Amino acid sequence: IISGALRHDSTQEAVERLKNATPQKEKLFEVWDGNLDLEEIRKKIPSNRHIRYFLGGENEIFHIGGKTYALTNQGWVAGSYESAVRAIKDEFPDLKIEIKRVAD
């Protein structure tokens, strides 16, 4: 959902709206100046911390306003997913996000 929101609205304002909608807030992204590729990012993050970010491909990093953002996979505690999805849905109504419960 975060990736989709940033692909739809790749502005600094959208980044801030996403940070405010999630439990991670300022820790949602690791940010570097410049338009770095995946290899450059991996060099900047200590190897024992690579697993803390979604770094599976170029489509998982974002270039916005002369900065590069890597999304964290940390801090998503029980209950935070649903509240974050609802908040993102409210922040980005034009994405037409639907939330449906599935059977257990």
Image: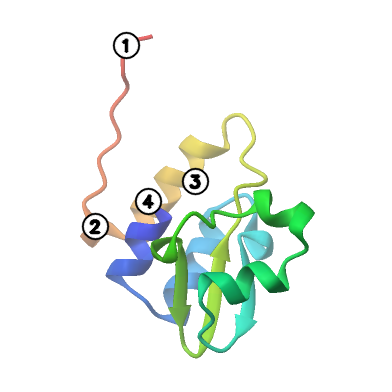
Crowd tier of the residue under label 2, counting other residues whose Cα lies within 10 Å: few below 14, some 14–19, many 20 or above:
some
For badge 2, the amino acid type reads: Leu
| Mark 1 closeness class: few <14, some 14–19, many ≥20 residues within 10 Å | few
Q: N-terminal of the two: label 1 or label 2?
A: 2
Q: Residue at x 42, y 72 (%)?
A: 14
CA gap, disc 4 and disc 3: 10 Å
> Helix or strand or loop: what does disc 4 sit on?
loop
At 61% from the left and 40% from the top, the residue drawn is 76
Residue 45 occupies which quadrant of the picture? bottom right
On the image, numbered disc 1 is attached to which residue? 103
Which type of secondary structure does the marked residue at label 3 adopt?
helix
Say the numbered circle drawn on residue 95: 2
Residue 48 lies, in percent from the top left, at 78, 53
> Which amino acid, by three-letter code, is at mark 3?
Ala
Residue 60: percent from left, percent from top: 45, 61
- Residue at 35% in and 62% down: 5
How many marks on residues?
A: 4
Q: Earlier in the sequence, mark 1 or mark 3?
A: 3
Amino acid on which the number 1 mark rests in the picture: Ala
Q: Kindly state the secondary structure of the residue where label 1 is placed.
A: loop
Height in image: 25 above or below 9? above
Distance of label 1 from label 2 (alpha carbons): 25 Å
Q: Residue 6 is drawn in which quadrant?
A: bottom left
Q: At which x and y percent is residue 66?
A: 50, 90
Q: Gap between marks 2 and 3, in whole Å?
A: 15 Å
| Marks 4 & 1, CB-CB < 8 Å contact | no
Q: Please tell me in which quadrant of the rendered image residue 59 appears.
A: bottom left
